[in-house]
Amino acid sequence: MAEIPDDHPRHDSLVTRHRIEAGVEQGITSKQGLIAQGRGEAFDYLLGEETTPTADGAERVAAAHLLLADHPVLSVNGNVAALVPGEIVALAEVTGADIEVNLFNRTEQRMQRIADHLRDHGAEDVKGLNADATIPGLSHERAKVDGDGIYAADVVLVPLEDGDRAEALAEMGKTELVVDLNPMSRSAQTAAVPIVDNIIRAIPAITEHATALRDASRDELRQIVAEFDRGAALDAAEQRIRNGDFE
Ligand code: PTJ
């Protein structure tokens, strides 16, 4: 890849593309992941390629949920593994969450490669390989989960996802924190906390909020969660895309 100068106006976007390309070459990211990245990039462009105040608020609420949870799990697919492996490990450490690989285009080889990649970035335990439980109502590979991981979780962070697993997890009564640049996607619409932001900005931001909130009382955390208005967050993102409304 050509060297990207730091002052290039599309620096972050080009670096992100390169990470996804490298992920495909390493057998971590699926080819469909390239298409997903293109969709995300288009929405990010319309959102101004920055974390909006509303998204930042949602990231704080997500941090509060993860800290309150009995069994939080961070779900990782091929795009997430390529873009933010170390950042996912850092978030898991701060919140005490499990990390579980869950793939739409599941093969044993990709599962292993992603788990190894996460371990190379410091993950101690990576779930998803046992696949000894099934999410009810899903007919594809994403239904396969670990019984002591996503299946047993009360709060799940679900980044870059197609909508049907998001709906199935919600049906199971789990609290879903969704990172998706498209506020109109089914996953964002289903989420308890829709975070309309690029995963490369969202995960470090959630970690930062979780670190700041680590000493907060459970009552304070519950209040942050209770005050969140998911509909208003989705509306604000949509207005920004449609009208360029900058809060
Ligand atoms: O690794 P696998 O096999 O599990 O496959 C994963 C992909 C991403 C290929 C699969 O989940 C998929 O096809 O996803 P979709 O249906 O294309 O949805 C991806 C969503 O994520 C879209 O709404 C995009 O706008 C959004 N998105 C893409 N890149 C980013 C993003 N959201 C946040 N940050 C991004 N970098």
Image (tube, rainbow, N blue to C red):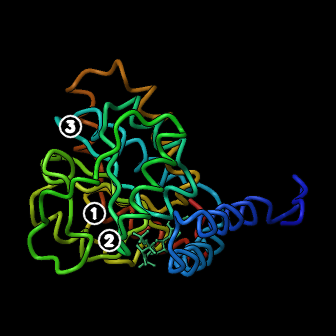
Residue bearing mark 3: 69
| Towards the viewer: 183 or 144 | 144
Q: What residue type is disc 1 on?
A: Ala
* CA distance separating discs 2 and 3: 20 Å
Question: Would residue 133 appear left or right of 163 to someone viewing this image?
Answer: left
Do the residues under discs 1 and 2 have CB atoms within 8 angstroms?
yes
Residue bearing mark 2: 187
Residue bearing mark 1: 191
State the mark number for residue 107. none
Labels 1 and 3: the sequence-earlier one: 3
Question: Would residue 204 appear left or right of 173 to someone viewing this image?
Answer: right
| Towards the viewer: 79 or 68 | 79
* CA distance separating discs 1 and 2: 6 Å
Foreground mark, 1 or 3? Answer: 3
Q: Position of residue 170 (x, y in %)?
A: 16, 64
Q: Residue at x 30, y 40 (%)?
A: 98
